[in-house]
Structure formats: C-alpha cells, structure tokens
C-alpha cells in the first residue's frame, strides 16, 4: 500500500509549512519592493527641486559645526575645522536639522480597506508616505527610525529597517501609537485616526509633551468621506467579530454622515493644533506626490526659519 502513495502525500507537514512560509515571505518581499518603488517615484520631483535650489545664497547657508557621528555623510566633513582639534566636525547647513525623526503607521484592521480596486488600501498609502519621507530625510542627513524601535540611523540600512518594520505582520495591530516617544524628536504619525476623539486627545497630548514636534497624516478612503453608495447597503466592521448593519436607503443618511465625518476630521485637526502639531488629510484618491510635497514644504519652511523640524 505504501508504494501507492502520491509524491504529495509523502511531503512532511513541516516541509509544507516551510514552503508556505517561503511563499508568504516572497509575496511580502515583492509587495515591499512595489511600495518602495512608489515611494521613490513620489520623492523624485522634490529631490530634483532641492538640487535646483542649491546655488550660492540659497539653501546652502552655513548653520553650525557639529561633531561627526556614524552615518553622517563624509562630504559634509569640514577638514579645516577638524584639523584644529582631535575630533572630526561636519558643517551643518541651515536646511538640515539636529533632531531625530520617528515614524508610526497604524496597523488597525480598518487600514486594509479600499472602496475601489484602482485605489491603494489606506495601509499601503501610509507605508508609501512613510517610506517616501524616510527617503527624503536620509537624503538630507536626518536620523530616522520607527517609533518604539531602538533601530535608527542616517543610512540606507536605517531606511531598510523601517521598511522591514512596516511589513512585519507579527507586530500587534494598533489604531493609535504607544505612549512613549524619544526626547527631542520629531514624530510622523500615519493612520486613519477614526478612534473617538476622546481616545485620540490624551495620546497626542502625552506624545507632544515628550517630543519636540509632530506631523499627523490622516489617511481616509474617499468613500469614507463621501459615502457615495445608493440603495440597500450592508456595512461590516473590520474587527474580528465582523458586526454588520443594514441600511435600507443610504442616500437618506448621506448628509448626516458627511457632517459627522467632517466634524471628526476637524476634531483630529484641532487636537493637533492644541499640541502645536501639523495635520494633513490624505484621501487615497489623491496623488501621493501632492501630499508629500505639502508635508515637505511645511517642513522646509520651518527648518529654514528655525533650523529645526516644525513644532
């Protein structure tokens, strides 16, 4: 009887599991590569604009000497100043900052939503924006890392660590960031922030007290903003219990729904303003390049005025 078994039957369970894990890893790697390509596309125009501005008297004004740290660009070393002591110094430009930037992306189940196959999920949009900001900051010599992680730096390795963190499905899902932030840091938080304002306010207030500045990117699907459906629609919670609610005539609640969503977005924005943070709304049908440019322009304006990331 043993000789009649198929080849498939003779594959050990452990080998089948390993094969499944390998395929999953390959799929994740391909997805990460795709997200990274999108992030690189988003930053091309901004980096090109920076290069065009780098002429005498614009964007390259000397700001201060700072001791060299691992990860700093060798071309920034000032050998004349370094030759005066036994230490190595770099010339920090006015457009550079002396803060560390930490990123956070919501892992809430609802972030996987998209109303149209032609749109990215909210989660993918958050990851692309985060990776794009990381690319821009490493290009400017900033120290970057993920909020809650001990890994940070100014090199390509730091950016890769962020990418791996974003794709790590073993990290528990969370709708809001944790309660710890490094001192003298700039925070960049990306999520839909659909939690009740009463839950959001204490989290943002606590983080703002520990950090120097913050930028909240609120990412929503256009259907979540407009409720474009008609007729009978069944709405389902993204949580594990998948609670459902049937609305017989969606158009009858559309005006009230839009009013509530607008009020919620306004409440999140007000919380950011109270924390002296910045807020940007990113509908997933908006070109990520435009949102990224809005964020980077805000950062650049404040950096040139104060030499630090905006508060």
Image: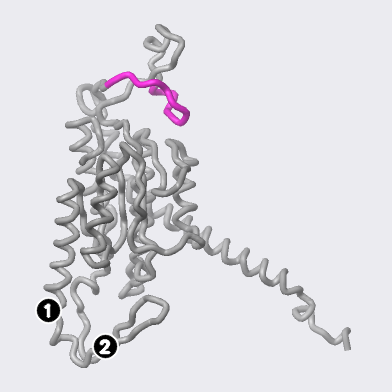
Q: Is residue 88 left or right of residue 181?
A: right
Q: Which residues are magenta?
A: 64-76
In the image, residue 282 above or below residue 78? below
Residue 72 among magenta residues:
yes
Residue 198 occupies which quadrant of the picture? bottom left
Task: Identify the residue at image location x=36%, y=48%.
Answer: 180
Compared with 216, 299 (above or below) is above
The residues tagged by marks 1 and 2 sit, at their Cα atoms, a distance apart of 16 Å
Percent position (x, y) of residue 72?
Answer: 42, 28
Image position, residue 223 (x, y; %)? 24, 74
| Mark 1 or mark 2, whichever is nearer to me | 1
User: Which residue is labeled 2 in the image?
Assistant: 233
Q: How many residues crowd mark 2 within 10 Å: few (<14), some (14–19), many (20+)? A: few
Q: Quadrant of residue 87?
A: top left
| Quadrant into which the N terminus falls | bottom right
Name the residue carrying label 1.
Answer: 256
In the picture, the disc for residue 229 is none
Q: Quadrant of residue 47?
A: top left
């Amino acid at each position: 009887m043993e000789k009649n078994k198929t080849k498939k039957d003779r594959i050990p369970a452990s080998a089948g599991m390993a094969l499944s894990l390998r395929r999953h890893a390959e799929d994740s790697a391909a997805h990460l590569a795709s997200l990274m390509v999108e992030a690189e596309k988003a930053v091309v125009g901004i980096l090109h604009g920076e290069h065009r501005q780098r002429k005498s008297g614009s964007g390259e004004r000397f700001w201060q000497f700072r001791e060299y740290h691992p990860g700093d660009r060798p071309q920034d070393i000032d050998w004349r100043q370094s030759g005066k002591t036994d230490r190595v110094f770099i010339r920090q430009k006015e457009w550079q900052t002396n803060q560390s930037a930490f990123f956070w992306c919501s892992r809430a189940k609802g972030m996987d939503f998209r109303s149209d196959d032609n749109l990215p999920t909210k989660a993918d949009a958050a990851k692309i924006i985060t990776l794009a900001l990381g690319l821009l900051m490493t290009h400017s010599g900033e120290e970057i890392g993920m909020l809650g992680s001990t890994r940070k730096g100014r090199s390509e390795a730091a950016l890769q660590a962020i990418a791996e963190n974003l794709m790590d499905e073993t990290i528990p899902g969370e709708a809001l960031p944790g309660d710890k932030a490094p001192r003298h840091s700039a925070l960049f938080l990306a999520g839909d922030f659909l939690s009740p304002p009463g839950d959001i306010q204490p989290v943002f207030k606590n983080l703002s007290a520990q950090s120097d500045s913050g930028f909240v990117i609120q990412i929503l699907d256009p259907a979540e903003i407009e409720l474009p459906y008609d007729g009978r629609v069944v709405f389902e919670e993204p949580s594990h219990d998948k609670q459902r609610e049937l609305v017989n005539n969606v158009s009858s609640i559309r005006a009230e729904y839009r009013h509530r969503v607008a009020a919620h977005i306004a409440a999140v924005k007000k919380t950011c303003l109270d924390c002296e943070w910045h807020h940007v709304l990113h509908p997933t049908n908006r070109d990520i390049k435009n949102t990224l440019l809005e964020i980077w322009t805000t950062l650049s304006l404040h950096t040139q005025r104060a030499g630090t990331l905006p508060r």
